[in-house]
């Protein structure tokens, strides 16, 4: 189901589909709320900021002009990839969910077949595969969205291999933040800004009265 609001400046604005509000960050929607109007068949604009609904907002990527792009992001499922060497944290401290993925092979014999494979990013995966770039040595995730849970703007991460999404705890983001800012391994300024924004969300008061 498409989620839409009216806007006195932009007209009809698409926010996303079902619980995924791909085309607005939390902060941008909150900023535009005074200029938003009800669109028949949708929720009241303020309800899209209400924690009782499981809406997931576009992450506030610092290299995007969210004011100009409100309702019109082309890369609607953008993910910001971060790789953390596993030796920098203890076993079990960081985790995201994984799922099997399906590969279809069009064989030259004329008999096509498909296979389900466990995600190579899953540290518990014991299936042998040719690990060309040390996938097993890294905890790899993509920052994609934010969701209000218990008055916190929590971070939603995605596995770049299987596409499964997970909600990160504040402790997990703190661990990633510490590693990225420690200087133990190199991360660019954009990565540091992204993890700063992620951590900030957990201390942000987001309850809608």
Image (tube, rainbow, N blue to C red):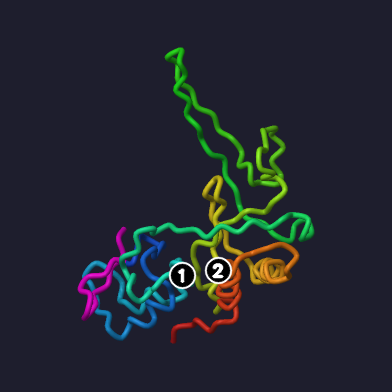
The secondary structure that dominates the magenta segment is: strand
Image quarter of residue 188: bottom right
Query: Would you name the residue on which mark 2 appears?
Result: 190
Instruction: Choose the circle earlier in sequence order: 2 or 1.
Output: 1
Image quarter of residue 8: bottom left
Per the image, is 115 magenta?
Answer: no
Task: Please state the extent of the stretch shown in magenta in the rendering.
Answer: 1-14
Query: Would you name the residue on which mark 1 appears?
Result: 63
- Viewer-nearest residue: 204 or 149: 204
Q: Residues within 10 Å of mark 1 (few under 14, many from 20)?
A: few
Point out residue 86 in the picture as x, y percentages from the top left corner.
Answer: 74, 54
Picture layout, residue 148 above or below residue 206: above
Left or right: 54 in relation to 119: left
Point out residue 42 in the picture as x, y percentages from the top left corner.
Answer: 28, 68
Q: Secondary structure at mark 2?
A: helix
Picture layout, residue 31 above or below residue 93: below
Point out residue 181 in the picture as x, y percentages from the top left corner.
Answer: 69, 71
Residue drawn at point x = 44 percent, y = 87 percent: 209
The reply to whether callout 2 and callout 1 are in contact (CB within 8 Å) is yes
Q: CA distance from mark 2 to mark 1?
A: 8 Å
Left or right: 65 in relation to 120: left
Image quarter of residue 131: top right
- Viewer-nearest residue: 7 or 150: 7
């Amino acid at each position: 189901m498409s989620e839409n609001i009216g806007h006195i400046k932009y007209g009809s604005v698409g926010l996303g589909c079902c619980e995924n509000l791909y085309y607005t960050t939390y902060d941008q929607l909150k900023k535009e709320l005074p200029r938003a109007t009800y669109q028949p068949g949708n929720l009241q604009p303020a309800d899209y900021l209400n924690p009782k609904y499981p809406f997931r907002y576009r992450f506030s990527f610092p290299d995007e002009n969210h004011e100009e792009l409100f309702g019109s992001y082309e890369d609607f499922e953008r993910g910001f990839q971060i790789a953390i060497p596993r030796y920098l944290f203890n076993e079990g401290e960081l985790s995201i969910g994984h799922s099997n993925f399906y590969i279809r092979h069009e064989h030259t014999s004329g008999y096509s077949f498909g296979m389900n494979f466990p995600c190579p990013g899953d540290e518990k995966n014991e299936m042998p595969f040719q690990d060309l770039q040390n996938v097993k040595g890294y905890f790899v995730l993509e920052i994609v969205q934010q969701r209000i849970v218990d008055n916190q703007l929590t971070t939603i991460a995605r596995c770049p291999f299987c596409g499964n999404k997970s909600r990160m705890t504040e402790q997990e983001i703190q661990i990633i933040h510490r590693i990225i800012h420690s200087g133990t391994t190199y991360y660019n300024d954009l990565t540091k800004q992204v993890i700063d924004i992620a951590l900030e969300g957990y201390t942000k008061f987001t309850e809608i009265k």
